[in-house]
């Protein structure tokens, strides 16, 4: 089995910063892609940022404010969030695309999510 766990959420004032961390563990041969998604009340889950083979991808709404980074050796991914605003309030989910054996199929695993609230 594979487990994905996020940490680092919380309450922050507008203009503040938070850093989210995620670690994937368990029966992992390799991780193809890792990313962060978020879901606000009443909205669909949306991509925030992802990293694949050293290339990063960001939602337009977070470009210039958020930075995703990955440690391949540790199976971790982080999201540094700066200049937060109330529209960033959501549950943030970590996602990992995992191969459990050499040349095997890739499965997507999700964490349970961590709440980020931006409010004064």
Image (tube, helix red, strand yellow):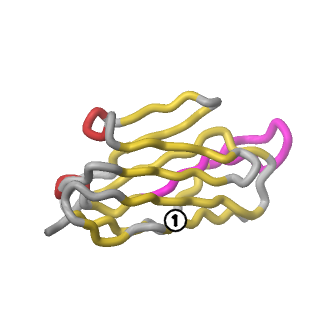
Left or right side of 9 for 41:
left
Farthest residue toward the left?
Answer: 120
Q: Main secondary structure of the magenta part?
A: strand
Magenta stretch encompasses residue 88 = no
Residue pointed to by mark 1: 6
Of the pair 50 and 112, the residue shown nearer to us: 50
Q: Position of residue 35 (x, y in %)?
A: 50, 46
Left or right side of 68 for 104:
right
Which residue is at a point 43% across and 50% down the rendered structure image? Answer: 80
Q: Which residues are magenta?
A: 93-107
Q: Position of residue 93 (x, y in %)?
A: 44, 58
Residue 58: name its quadrant.
top left
Which residue is at a point 67% across and 47% down the rendered structure image? Answer: 71
Q: Residues within 10 Å of mark 1 (few under 14, many from 20)?
A: many
Q: Position of residue 69 (x, y in %)?
A: 55, 43
Q: Is residue 9 above or below residue 57?
A: below
Left or right side of 79 for 64:
left
């Amino acid at each position: 089995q594979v487990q994905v766990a996020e940490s680092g959420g919380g309450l922050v004032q507008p203009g503040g910063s938070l850093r989210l961390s995620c670690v994937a563990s368990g029966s992992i041969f390799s991780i193809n892609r890792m990313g962060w998604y978020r879901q606000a009340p009443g909205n669909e889950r949306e991509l925030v940022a992802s990293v694949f083979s050293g290339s990063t991808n960001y939602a337009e709404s977070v470009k210039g404010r958020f930075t995703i980074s990955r440690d391949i050796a540790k199976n971790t991914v982080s999201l540094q969030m700066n200049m937060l605003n109330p529209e960033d309030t959501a549950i943030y989910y970590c996602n990992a695309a995992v191969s459990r054996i050499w040349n095997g199929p890739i499965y997507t695993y999700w964490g349970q999510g961590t709440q980020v609230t931006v409010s004064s």
